[in-house]
């Protein structure tokens, strides 16, 4: 990696147009009426790229994008100052429907499978990522893989980045996460259930989670963040661990909360913050995101306003 590298690169293999619909008292099997809606260019890596620009960091976004409907994404990239390095593939980028119920404060996701990139498209992405990683400060691979692609795809991309000596963060789930962990990324952000599934047994206490996270760290991962949902998150490195508890907020939508955490961590570490301060920042930004319908913040002011309310507890086990 070039010592002067500053650009952060995000990779989104399976982006989506997020159609967020507000439906009070949403009831499956019944007629439900939408009171408000909005469409956003989305996908985990796209959401992270949007947030990183709010930290005034240079960002390049890549991955796959459907040739038939790129306009919402191109508008976001142009307005936000995100460098567009997406590989275009035939067909449409999928739509993900988010049903937001303000009464139950729950979000129901209806996710479509997405397009089917070919082996040639994947090779093109590897080539693009190899070129971008040569001058990148950090690469963040986030989201699912399109249904037709192998779960090992993300692990292969991790290896492409690591070959350039560049830190690589991964935020994915299921078999793709299991494969990615084996490739030894710099940072991962599973939730409690995902880490339990990876280990093949339930993890029920903070002590258990930290102990298992440290076993993975011994295998080459630097930082593991384990989301505990509304309770907060555990931030674990080899020699330190913190529990971050968010303030109580009115939840409008959980869409983008995890992306906000990963993006804030990348920004915080890029700015030289400690793990303690990164945990506070990431938890505040994530908590601010859930108070609105879209996947991103209009500005960081909402997060700054509640940052002092985040509780950070150092764990001594």
Image: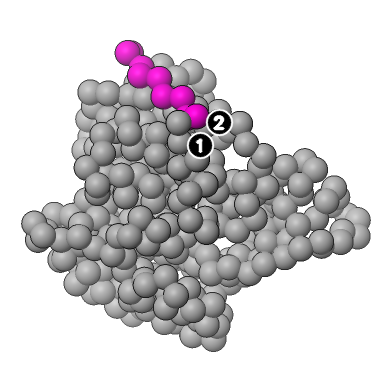
Q: Hey, which quadrant is residue 141 in on the image? A: bottom left
**Residue 64 makes an appearance in the image:** no
Left or right side of 201 for 223: left
| Residue 34, horizontal then vertical, whole percent | 82, 62
Which of the image's four quarters has the N terminus?
A: bottom left
Range of residues picked out in magenta: 309-317
Left or right side of 183 for 19: right
Q: Name the residue furthest left.
A: 3
Q: Nearer the viewer, residue 224 or 249?
A: 249
Q: Is residue 263 magenta?
A: no
Q: Is residue 313 magenta?
A: yes
Q: Tell me if mark 1 has few (under 14), some (14-19) or many (20+) residues whose alpha carbon lies within 10 angstroms of its own.
A: many
Which of the image's four quarters has the C terminus?
A: top left
**Residue under the image location 59 percent in, 46 percent down:** 290
Q: Tell me if mark 2 has few (under 14), some (14-19) or many (20+) residues whose alpha carbon lies within 10 angstroms of its own.
A: some
| Residue 293, horizontal then vertical, whole percent | 64, 55
- Label 1 vs 2, first from the N-terminus: 2
Image: 201 above or below 290: above
Between label 1 and label 2, give the one nearer the viewer: 1
Look at mark 2 in the image and give the residue it sits on: 247
**Residue 101 makes an appearance in the image:** yes
Q: Do labels 1 and 2 touch, CB within 8 Å?
A: yes
**Residue under the image location 46 percent in, 25 percent down:** 311
**Residue under the image location 91 percent in, 56 percent down:** 30
- Helix, strand or loop at label 2? It is loop
| Residue 316, horizontal then vertical, whole percent | 32, 13
Numbered disc total = 2
| Residue 163, horizontal then vertical, whole percent | 15, 58
**Residue under the image location 33 percent in, 60 percent down:** 56
Look at mark 1 in the image and give the residue it sits on: 306
Left or right side of 181 for 159: left
Q: Which mark is residue 124?
A: none
């Amino acid at each position: 990696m070039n010592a002067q590298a500053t650009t952060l690169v995000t990779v989104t293999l399976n982006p989506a147009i997020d159609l967020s619909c507000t439906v009070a008292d949403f009831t499956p099997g019944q007629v439900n009426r939408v009171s408000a809606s909005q469409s956003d260019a989305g996908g985990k890596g796209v959401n992270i790229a949007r947030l990183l620009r709010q930290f005034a960091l240079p960002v390049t976004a890549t991955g796959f994008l459907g040739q038939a409907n790129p306009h919402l994404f191109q508008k976001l990239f142009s307005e936000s100052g995100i460098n567009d390095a997406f590989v275009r593939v035939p067909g449409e980028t999928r739509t993900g429907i988010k049903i937001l119920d303000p009464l139950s404060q729950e979000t129901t996701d209806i996710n479509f499978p997405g397009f089917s990139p070919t082996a040639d498209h994947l090779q093109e992405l590897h080539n693009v990522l190899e070129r971008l990683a040569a001058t990148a400060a950090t690469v963040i691979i986030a989201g699912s893989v399109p249904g037709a692609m192998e779960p090992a795809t993300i692990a292969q991309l991790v290896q492409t980045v690591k070959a350039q000596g560049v830190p690589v963060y991964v935020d994915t789930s299921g078999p793709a996460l299991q494969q990615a962990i084996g490739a030894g990324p710099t940072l991962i952000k599973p939730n409690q259930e995902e880490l339990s599934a990876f280990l093949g047994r339930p993890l029920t206490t903070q002590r258990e989670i930290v102990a298992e996270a440290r076993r993975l760290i011994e295998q080459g991962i630097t930082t593991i963040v384990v989301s505990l949902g509304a309770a907060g998150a555990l931030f674990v490195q080899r020699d330190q661990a913190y529990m971050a508890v968010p303030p109580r907020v009115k939840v409008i939508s959980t869409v983008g909360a995890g992306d906000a955490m990963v993006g804030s961590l990348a920004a915080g570490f890029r700015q030289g913050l400690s793990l303690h301060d990164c945990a506070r920042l990431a938890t505040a930004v994530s908590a601010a995101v859930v108070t609105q319908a879209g996947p991103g913040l209009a500005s960081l002011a909402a997060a700054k306003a509640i940052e002092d309310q985040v509780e950070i507890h150092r764990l001594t086990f």
